[in-house]
Image (cartoon, rainbow, N blue to C red):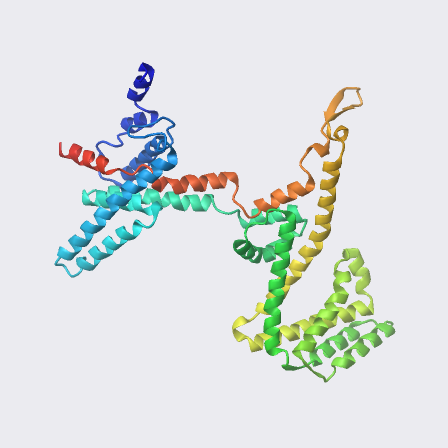
Amino acid sequence: MPPWEKYQQQQPKPWEKYAISHGAGGSYGPDSVLGGAGRRLKDVVSGIGQTFDPRMQSGENIFTANPLARIVKGLYGQEKIAGRQAMEQFKEAGNTPDVVNKPLGYLRALVTGASMLNPFAVGSVANVNQLEKEGRHEEALGQGMTDVASLGLSRLFGGKPSAAKSINKLAYATEANPADLKTVLPDIQQVVKARGVPKTLQEAGQLINEVNRNYSNQFNLALQRVAGRQVSTQPIADALKAEAQRLPPDAIAERQALLGAAQPYDGQIWNLRDLNAARMFRNQKLSGFYNKGVTGQIAADSSASTLIDRTIADSARDLLYGEMDKYFPQQQGFFRALKQKQGAMIKIMDDMQPHIESVERQEAYSKGAPLSAKLPHARFTSSGMPHMIENVNMRAGANTLANRATRQAFKPTAMGTTVRGVGATVPLLGHPTQQDILERLANANQ
């Protein structure tokens, strides 16, 4: 071995210097919760350094000198310690005459044995058991809490995006109204959980269509059970007559149109299937009205046909949902809320389809542009000074940006993934080996 390599091996590693200077691995000092938490963090620092050290350590070869092999070796050692502890705890419980502590002892042995099935738990459980055996109860509590907190914090800060971020990303990707997205986001997330994260804007469109089909299926299955149920349509006729009475005296033609529209509902009995068909028909006729701007809606609202369609649609809706609530008393308001969500979803789909076509067209223009159109070019200010203008064609295309936002709406960010990975790794690293335990006990007896 060359002298310089021998010298490097003899030098203490940075994490060993840190651990030695802070008391880790030797005397544990006073038994306290805070001391246990602090020492656990120090052991983790030391464990991370040892695990990811690029140099070959004692007893390693070219196949085992890597982080994965070291983690597996450490887990194997913790499994052996936990297995030995479980057997000892089981024997102790069997030898305990106390009828109260006996079942608790068996339960403790069971927990230790079960931890062997979870690589994120076995090291922590074995470590806590050993500290408890040494009588360092507060130390055990502090170290165990540190491992649990690391997992909890990693899930809290490294999980999926917040609802607000998902809505903002989807609004950018789809050009849909954020209020509509907020209404249906939980249902979209359920489908994403089952189908996986959409990678493109087009896949998001397919996913949204699936959510809309789910809404329709839920409503139609419930409607089939009550389709033949009879109901009086008099409330619809009364609503049309009330609108006619509110018109000014000179609106003779409009009043007659409203009263004429009330006749098919006046004193009639319909089944719920036909009532739902009337509601859907009137809503379809009103779709053009709701797509108008505020000025357009004000102008169209004065027409008799719009007033008739809206009155029938609203009255039929209230009548239908009221009857369904009576038939399904444990789902009060469910069908009204379901249709409101479907209405929001339909608006999202209406906004999204032309947007998909637009970004695909812009992407094609960007990729198909000649090189001269993609390069930056100079422009001159009013004073004659040139400055460079970046051509938008050099940037990512519109479809590419929409796809990126679509993925970010459901996937954790790179930072979140890193935080979660680090937090989940903490319980795997820095736990004492059997040799460490023996050395610690020997030092304590000196």
Image side of residue 2 versus residue 184, left or right: left
In the rendered image, the quadrant that contains the C terminus is top left
Determine the residue positioned at 51% across, 73% down: 330
Q: Quadrant of the N terminus?
A: top left
For the point 29% across and 35% down, which residue is it? 39
Q: Position of residue 323 (x, y in %)?
A: 61, 77
For residue 293, what is the image quadrant? bottom right
In the image, 207: left or right of 436? right
Foreground pick, 81 / 446: 81
Asked if residue 255 lies left or right of residue 355, the reply is right
Q: Where's residue 375, x and y in %?
A: 73, 27
The residue located at (24%, 56%) in the rendering is 107
Q: Quadrant of residue 213?
A: bottom right
In-front residue for pair 368/13: 368
Residue drawn 65% across the image and 75% down it: 319
Residue 154, relative to residue 226: is it above or below? above
Q: Residue 401, image x and y in percent?
A: 65, 41
Asked whether residue 30 appears in the rendered view, the answer is no
Count of labels in the image? 0
Above or below, 219 against 176 in this view is: below
* Residue in the foreground of this view, choosing between 317 and 211: 211
Residues 1 and 296: in front is: 1
- Farthest residue, direction top: 3
Left or right: residue 136 compared with residue 305: left
Q: Is residue 416 above or below residue 274?
A: above
State whether residue 376 appears in this view: yes
Picture coordinates of residue 234, whole percent (x, y): 70, 81
Query: Residue 58 falls in which quadrant of the image?
Result: top left
